Amino acid sequence: MSAFILELGLAVVALLVFGASLGARGSDRRWIAWLATGGVLVLGIVSMFVAPTRPALGGMFVQDGLAIFAKRLFLTATFIGLLAGISREGAACGRRAGEYHLLILSSLLGMLVLASARDLILLFVAFELMSIPLYVLAGFLKREDVAVEAALKFFLVGSVSSAVMVYGLSFVYGAAGTTDLARVAQTFTRGQPLLTLGLLAVFAGFAFKIAAFPFHMWVPDTYEAASTPFVAWLSVAPKAAGFVALFRVYFEGMGERAAAWVPIAAGLATITIVAGNLMALPQQNTKRLLAYSGIAHIGYMLVGFAAASASGTAMVLFYLVAYVFGNMGAFLVVEAVARSEGSEATAALRGLAQRSPLLALAMLLFLLSLGGIPFVAGFWAKLYVFWAAASAGLYWLVLVGAVLTVVALFYYLVVAKRMYIEPPASAGRIQLSRSLALAVILCALGVVALGVYPKPVVMAALRVAAPLF
């Protein structure tokens, strides 16, 4: 089976969407959305049968276990995000439906290539292929001034981070004399200062892509202004791609010297967890609250990264899977309420349990998962990354993470209080489109299934992480 089967399949889907958009008529173009969503679903099913193959392009492109695991994650998140965006009044199904879905698929193609990149040039090109469509999508609701402002901020900060990254990569190439990650690892064992400086600059670029503090400044405004189904996808898929690239460069690419990055990763994890949770406390807009909460979750994932071990890497991968279902689900409930109430404030959730008990129950499951309460997916995710960090001797980092988890529970439970204790501001059930309801159900099932029986995903993550070390 070709190493490029998923990438080629996605290119075919993108061409079909492009061709369909050229001949489309009318303002309701949901059929284009269904075409893109169905194409991603088919690719997701195909990915379950993809097996590792020999490296291609002279070793620049690999289809190993890590790449396949990541691609399945990207396709799952994209399917849920596209499914949730299908509605008569949604921006993704109007006159620009073809543009919207073509941009999503282009960014997804960048993620698929990034997961397989074992060469610095291919890695950077894949990063830009992933990132540039995101800047456009952030301002897709261009009639709203706040969306344009958020997209511009996202673009400017992203451009600077890309410049810093490529500048660092130039140092790496200058010191190592190669862009092949395997040969860079051999050079790094000789401890060249120029190479270390380059890798530090690259790490700063990665920190922006995953929205770690203090490289997070684009996150809250972009999340608040952009279309919520897109934000749900943006909050998980590109960050997962960023972590896979981190594993490639700093674990697979550094060989025996991977432990040299532990102090930097641990320090970044600490300030990210603290800042994300503290900034989430005063938020009254639910999307901004989830944005800062997401920054804190990146900090927890960095705890696993700081362990610099196979178990730490595997637990970050499991955390990403749990985070896809929990975080996307929370955003989609916000979208359902916003469509009905016209507001994304936490106050719009008041009395949700009385109006739509099942929707409130789903939101409660998502909040409990994000908060790390037994026995839903997020509990195991946090427990496992803390366990990996403790095994590496980072007890102080585990203590910081555990204490700030309690802080996070406060603002999650404030939202739960609004749903279950405060009286509703208006009567009547929250109406969901069938596609949005299905997306919420899929997320809820994922959170519960991983909470009840996480072993299959954990074992799969351990298998794909072990070869990196």
Image: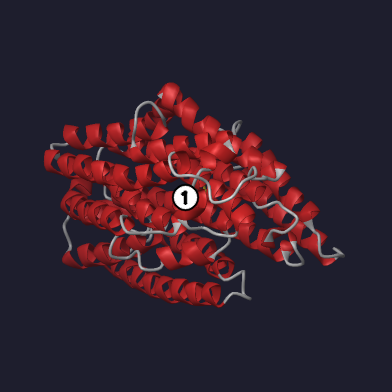
In this image, 92 relative to 404: left or right?
right
Judge by depth and name the residue closer to the eye, 193 or 421: 421
| Residue 273, x across and y down, in percent | 26, 51
10 Å crowding of disc 1: few (<14), some (14-19), many (20+): many
| Residue 103, x across and y down, in percent | 63, 62
Tell me the element at label 1.
loop
Judge by depth and name the residue closer to the eye, 157 or 348: 348
Residue that appears at 39% across and 28% down: 458
Residue 312, by quadrant, is top left
In this image, 336 relative to 243: left or right?
right
| Residue 459 position (above or below residue 121) | above
Whether residue 464 is visible here, answered yes or no, is: no
Judge by depth and name the residue closer to the eye, 448 or 285: 285
Residue that appears at 19% across and 50% down: 266
Figure label count:
1
| Residue 230, x across and y down, in percent | 57, 57
* Residue type highlighted by circle 1: Val
Q: Which residue is label 1 attached to? A: 236
Residue that appears at 43% across and 37% down: 322
In this image, 12 relative to 233: left or right?
right
Q: Quadrant of the N terminus?
A: top right
